Image (cartoon, helix red, strand yellow):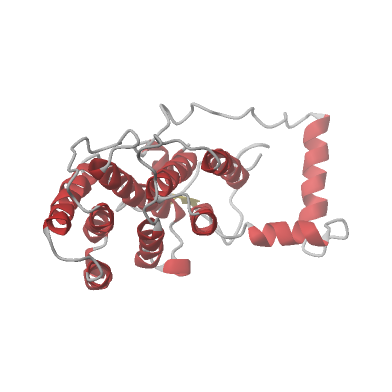
Amino acid sequence: MNQKLKIVVAVGLILSLFLAACNKNNLPETTPDNISNAVIIKWNEVAFETMGGSANQHSLLGSRIYAMVHMAMHDAVNATQPRFETYAFEGKEPTANTEVAASSAAHGVLKNLFPARLSFLDSVLSNYLSTIPQGEPKTKGVVLSIEVANATLGLGHNSNGAQNHFGQPVPAVKPGDYKLVLPFDFIFAPFWEHSKLFSLESKDQFRPLPPPALASEQYAIDFNEVKSVGLLASTTRTADQSAFAKYWYETSETGWNRIARVVATERKPGLFKTARLFALLNFAIADAYTA
């Protein structure tokens, strides 16, 4: 199973579990999750635009930023009305406006990571907060968000993003060694395997089985299949297989967050379940890249 497929499978499991959970009432009957989930979806889109939108090519960093933003929003909403166990922030402020806390927490994380985008982020937050009536709940929501953002950033998940991302592998000298193929004459961010994990206990916690031995019949079968199906002018690749490849060309963190926005918009599971969905989803993506 190749690296991208592993990420797709891991994240797909998270989404399938969430979809099943959407059909159950995970919260007490006396506290229905009936607050709009629009704030979570909105700031997921804002994070995407802040990172450069579809032009962003740093998937590893993008996955971590998504995870930090949604960690902050998850902890912020649960600080106002506890429903789920929090990750970075354990404080409580039941009189704070939940949506203000969520949006301002996302803003606090993003402005720290992208100071050059401060004007854009301030404008988005200002426009969003202008729809919320003035008063103590709004003020407390903003104050709470600062504490949540600081707690999120304090965990150190953004500590190695500034290193040189282009590394060189050990030269291939025997069959089975990794060999560079132009135009990709480098290894991207080899240090990323040492990134701080969000949910895994260790980077090798769920290692798959190794590939078939080079001298085995199964390796020869798989090798020839790749050559046959992957050839530019392949006569064995079906139209559907070509479509699958083009569909998954989108990077995992971009594609799965887009899918999650569609699911959350259509199913309307409520603010708290949506906050949890996006946090779990992005923890899974970030840790899958690191693993």
Where is residue 187? Give x, y as percent.
Answer: 49, 49
Q: Could you tell me which residue is drawn at 18 percent across and 37 percent down?
A: 91
Q: Could you tell me which residue is drawn at 64 percent across and 29 percent down?
A: 210
- Most extreme residue toward the right is 235
Q: Is residue 148 left or right of residue 69?
A: left
Q: Nearer the viewer, residue 231 or 153?
A: 153
Q: Is residue 116 above or below residue 23?
A: below
Q: Is residue 54 left or right of residue 113?
A: right
- Most extreme residue toward the front is 30
Q: Is residue 26 left or right of residue 177?
A: left
Where is residue 110? Give x, y as percent.
Answer: 27, 58
Where is residue 135? Give x, y as percent.
Answer: 12, 61
Quadrant of the image occupied by residue 191:
top left
Q: Quadrant of the N terminus?
A: top right
Q: Nearer the viewer, residue 91 or 220?
A: 91
Counting labels gives: 0
Q: Nearer the viewer, residue 148 or 196?
A: 148
Quadrant of the image occupied by residue 182:
bottom right
Q: Is residue 105 left or right of residue 71?
A: left
Where is residue 255? Give x, y as percent.
Answer: 54, 57
